Image: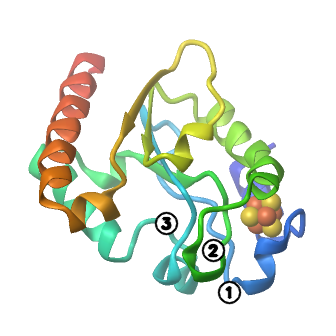
């Protein structure tokens, strides 16, 4: 299945309750040959409005921190474990994650990234495929709010930059 077909399935998906409160499905974006994939929890209000991942405050903070370490956001494929916004931005319920994970699995199998970066605790439910390096890091929204987490987040992005350099 092509990514376009997959995106269409996500836009039309009714496999869990989350589509009911959403304006747009947010499949994710980035090059289909990306060496690095970022996976967050779920789209927020700004993402729901425009149908694009990580474009709100946390996304801008993420993009800026990546750039400070020489990483271009547009080189990465960015997505979430669930593709529709949740009410009050709550953590997705496990049945919602289970329903949505096949989309992420297909994205991983199609893009075949070398590194997958899991943003925050919920992203840890991302399927683990052989031959891919996984990094668990702080979610940018937490890093943006708390000084101690911000410093650690910067170190984690610096480590990602190092690992990316090793790939090229
Ligand atoms: S969150 Fe995922 S499983 Fe639920 S309706 Fe949206 S695309 Fe479908």
* Residue 85 circle label: 2
The one nearer the camera, 34 or 78, is 78
The local crowd at label 2, few if under 14, some if 14 to 19, many if 20 or more residues have their Cα within 10 Å, is many
Q: Position of residue 131 (x, y in %)?
A: 55, 13
Ligand 1 within 8 Å of the CB at mark 3: no
Is 23 above or below relative to 26? below
Task: Say which element carries label 2.
Answer: loop
Q: Position of residue 109 (x, y in %)?
A: 67, 30
Kindly indicate the quadrant of the structure image that contains residue 146: bottom left
Contact (Cβ within 8 Å) of mark 1 with mark 3:
no
Question: Upstream in the sequence, badge 2 or badge 3?
Answer: 3
* Residue 97 circle label: none
Q: Nearer the viewer, mark 2 or mark 3?
A: 2
Contact (Cβ within 8 Å) of mark 2 with mark 1:
yes
- Please name the residue shown 61% across and 38% down the image: 126
- Please name the residue shown 47% across and 82% down the image: 46
Question: Upstream in the sequence, badge 1 or badge 3?
Answer: 1
Q: Position of residue 161 (x, y in %)?
A: 20, 33
Q: Can residue 92 be seen at all in this image of the molecule? A: yes
Q: Which residue is mark 1?
A: 23
Is 109 above or below relative to 68? above
Disc 2 versus disc 3: distance between alpha carbons? 11 Å
Q: Which residue is mark 3?
A: 53
Is 120 above or below relative to 64? above
The local crowd at label 1, few if under 14, some if 14 to 19, many if 20 or more residues have their Cα within 10 Å, is some
């Amino acid at each position: 299945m092509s990514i376009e077909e997959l995106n269409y399935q996500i836009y039309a998906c009714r496999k869990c309750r989350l589509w009911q409160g959403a304006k747009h499905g947010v499949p994710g974006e980035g090059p289909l040959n990306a060496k690095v994939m970022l996976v967050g929890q779920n789209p927020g209000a700004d993402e729901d409005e425009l149908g694009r991942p990580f474009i709100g405050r946390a996304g801008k903070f993420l993009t800026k921190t990546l750039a400070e370490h020489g990483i271009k956001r547009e080189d990465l494929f960015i997505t979430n474990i669930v593709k529709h916004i949740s009410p009050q931005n709550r953590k997705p319920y496990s049945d919602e994650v289970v329903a949505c994970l096949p989309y992420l699995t297909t994205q991983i199998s199609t893009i075949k990234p070398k590194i997958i970066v899991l943003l925050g605790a919920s992203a840890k439910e991302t399927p683990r495929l052989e031959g891919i390096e996984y990094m668990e890091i702080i979610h940018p929204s937490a890093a943006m709010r708390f000084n101690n987490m911000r410093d650690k987040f910067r170190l984690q992005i610096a480590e990602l930059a190092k690992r990316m350099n090793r790939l090229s």
